Every structure is written in C-alpha cells, then in structure tokens.
Image (cartoon, grey):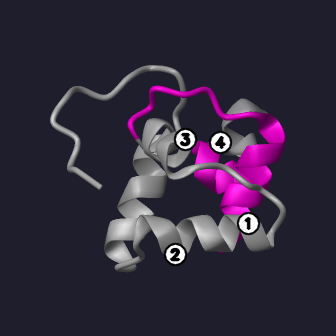
Amino acid sequence: MRRRTGRLGDRNIVGEKILAYRIANNILQKDFLAHLQIRGLDISAVSLARIEGQMRFVRDHEVIIIASAMKTTPNELLGYCFEDYF
C-alpha cells in the first residue's frame, strides 16, 4: 500500500498510535489485519488505513479489539488516565 502523503484527519485519537505501534514492531498492515480478524474484527485494509490516517471513526468495540491486538489496554490506547480526573 502507498505511503500517506496527506494530512491526518480528526475523526479518532487512536490511529496515530496504531500506526506507530505497527512501525515500531515491524508489523505489516496485512499481518495486523490478521491479528484483528482472529479476535473477531473483520475490517478491510482500506478501513485500517483510514483509521491510521484518522479519517475514520473507531467504534468502542473496535477500540477494545485493537488494544488487545496491540497487547495494551483501551485506556492506554485512548491515552486516558482515570487518576487525571479524580
């Protein structure tokens, strides 16, 4: 797939983290899609590219599955810390 040349969108806050995770762990998009599919999330390569480019909204159940595939928590993926609010 081609490299993104345009700007990032503003439809999610997890896309940039997903892309950074894949690059840091040398995981191809098709391999990450396989990890998602094993966990029950069947999305296309185009959908993943749009998520990573922050051009597609991410549903709550998708965040949970994506976090699982990244071996992290949804809170970490979202950058959310409960202690900041209490």
In the displayed structure, 68 sits above or below 45; it is below
Vertical side of 55 occupied by 40: above or below: below
Three-letter code, disc 3: Ser
Residue at the bottom extreme?
26
Residue that numbered label 1 is attached to: 37
Report x, y in % for residue 59: 75, 34
**Quadrant of res 20:** bottom left
Q: Residues within 10 Å of mark 1 (few under 14, many from 20)?
A: some
Which range of residues does the magenta coloring cover?
53-80
**Element under disc 1:** helix
Describe the element under mark 4 as helix, strand or loop. Answer: loop
In this rendered view, identify the residue nearer to me: 60 or 74: 60
Residue that sits furthest to the top in the current view: 10
For disc 3, the neighbor class at 10 Å (few under 14, some 14 to 19, many from 20) is: some
The residue indicated by pointer 2 is 31
At mark 2, the secondary structure is helix
Measured as percent of width and height from the top left, residue 15 is found at 48, 43
- In three-dimensional space, the C-alpha distance between marks 2 and 1, rounded to whole angstroms, equals 10 Å
Residue in the picture at 75% in, 42% down: 82
Label 4 Cα crowd, 10 Å radius (few <14 / some 14-19 / many 20+): few
- Give the image quarter of residue 39: bottom right
Task: Say whether marks 2 and 4 touch (CB < 8 Å).
Answer: no
Earlier in the chain: of badge 2 and badge 4, it is: 2
Q: Nearer the viewer, mark 4 or mark 3?
A: 3
- Mark toward the start of the polypeptide (2 vs 1): 2
- Report which residue position mark 4 lands on: 80
| Mark number, residue 24 | none
